[in-house]
Amino acid sequence: MTGSPSARDIWRPGFHLLPPAGWVNDPNGLCQFEGTYHVFCQCSPDWPALDATRGWGHLTSRDLVTWEWQGMALMPDTADDATGAYSGSAFVGDDGLLHLVYTGNVKLPGKHDYITSGRLANQIEVTSADGEHLSSKRVVLRNADYPSWCSCHVRDPKVWRQAGTLHMLLGARGLDSEGAALVYRSDDDGATWELEEEVRPGTPGAFGYMWECPDRVSLDGHEYLAFCPQGLEHGHLRFQNVYQSGYVPLEDRLLSADAMAEDGVPLRHVDVDDFREWDLGFDFYAPQTFATDDGRTVLIGWAGLPDVPYGNPTGELGWMHCLTVPRELTRGSNGTVCQRPVGELARLRGNEAPLLDDEVTFEHGRFDLEVTGITASSWKVTLAAASNGSVVLACDDGSLTLAFDGTAGDGRDVRRAHVGHVDDLRILCDRSIMEVYLDGGATVMTTRWYPSTSAVRLDVSCGDAETHVWPMADVMSEALAGTR
Ligand code: FRU
């Protein structure tokens, strides 16, 4: 595999999480354990080697700003997770230990479609007293433990504690190719699990064939079911990406079924019309949330998607993808979940950069832009590379577009949203990744882009709005230097 990224790598993010080399996708096992933040993530260190194994990489932080790479925490090294230590989550047990629960993916040899046969989906637990050294692996659920209507696609356990009891959400694909979620419950603090509720689409055929990475979010006493449905029909302003990632605001608790399934298990229906996307940009999927010790709910997503029709040229440099910054979640109007970069990130700001004729150039492609008090109904922010084009965020009477001009988007074209009047915007740009937050994070768009030079020119045309912009520090290069 290629070694650590070189200094010539002008696309390498400086404050977005990623491993030193290789491939990264979903964030896993997010938690704050004994004061330390842990971000595990799906990593293939030997990517792009054929059959590169997929396990859990591990980063830690004391402040959500500076990080340390701890190496690979979990690798597929048993018969129960032979083809991958897939996504999962963390919880602290009554035993005071950190528990990590993940899916051991096993593809059996032979002639299989790997949907209805040939795949084991083992939910596996390991524990740790210090967040670093892990116990041996213990399978807690196997294919035989799932309802008979499930295919072999059952994965991504998200465990949470509610009124003292542990519950586990799993994403699933039915044999009828309907997405679904399963909720298990443990009355012995994770030793054994029992099916408690099934969540299925209200209208058959409308909510995709598979739901990945389910999560349960609770904000101000309101619950949300989050997941990533695959196979939704694309719309003009909705579901513009290959797969979706969002949440359904629940009117009551997740665990209050509205029906009884044929197998006698309480059943809850959710409707695709109630589904809201987390992020309307080109590159966002498989987020996970966790609670901080100071009571915040924080989300981190994968700034990427599988099977996209556009490119990411960093493969030639030996690395692929990164995570989003940590985003604090709050409940906004109409039950919308607002996402804002955690306040700690402001510590990475350098001296405010003056704009001259609305323009400023950032030599290292990293900045934090804040525009408040927008009164104009039409405005535009352009980020231009020296020779391969630009990306333009524009609003015209409530119609928002994030559009590429030239080749810097590597095949990305345009993403649209209807936003009404926009009061404020924030853009965090970290070389090849840009996160856009509008109206206090009520609308968010994340995209990768690949400028031809390290220096990029920012042009802010937002009328008489108040504009501040700061260069942002690179904390990841140092954190990852010399590590593997
Ligand atoms: C989502 C996902 C998960 C799976 C993991 C494998 O991106 O497909 O469902 O556990 O990635 O890396």
Image (spheres, rainbow, N blue to C red):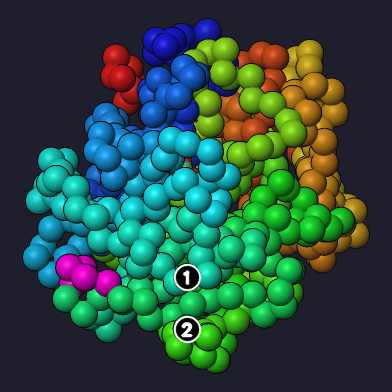
Up the image or down, 414 lies above or below 45; here it is: below
Q: Is residue 219 magenta?
A: no
- For label 1, the residue is 148
Give me the disc on residue 263. Answer: 2
The main secondary structure of the magenta stretch is loop
Question: In the rendered picture of this protein, how many numbered marks are placed on residues?
Answer: 2
Read off the magenta span. 189-193
Report whether residue 290 is seen.
no
Up the image or down, 460 lies above or below 155; here it is: above
Cβ–Cβ below 8 Å for labels 1 and 2?
Answer: yes
Pick the front one: 293 or 85: 85
Residue 135 relative to residue 12: left or right: left
- The kind of residue tagged 2 is Asp
Report whether residue 104 is seen.
yes
- The kind of residue tagged 1 is Ser
Q: Earlier in the sequence, mark 1 or mark 2?
A: 1
Residue 11 relative to residue 239: left or right: left
Q: Residues within 10 Å of mark 2 (few under 14, many from 20)?
A: few
Please tell me in which quadrant of the rendered image residue 279 appears. bottom right
Q: Residue furthest front?
A: 111
Pick the front one: 278 or 433: 278
x 36%, y 77%: residue: 195
Where disc 2 sits, the SS reads loop
Tell me: is circle 2 under 8 Å from ligand 1. no
Pick the front one: 23 or 196: 196
x 39%, y 36%: residue: 83
**x and y, in percent, of residue 19 in the image:** 39, 28
Q: Is residue 192 magenta?
A: yes
x 44%, y 10%: residue: 2
x 51%, y 65%: residue: 150
Tell me: is circle 1 under 8 Å from ligand 1. no
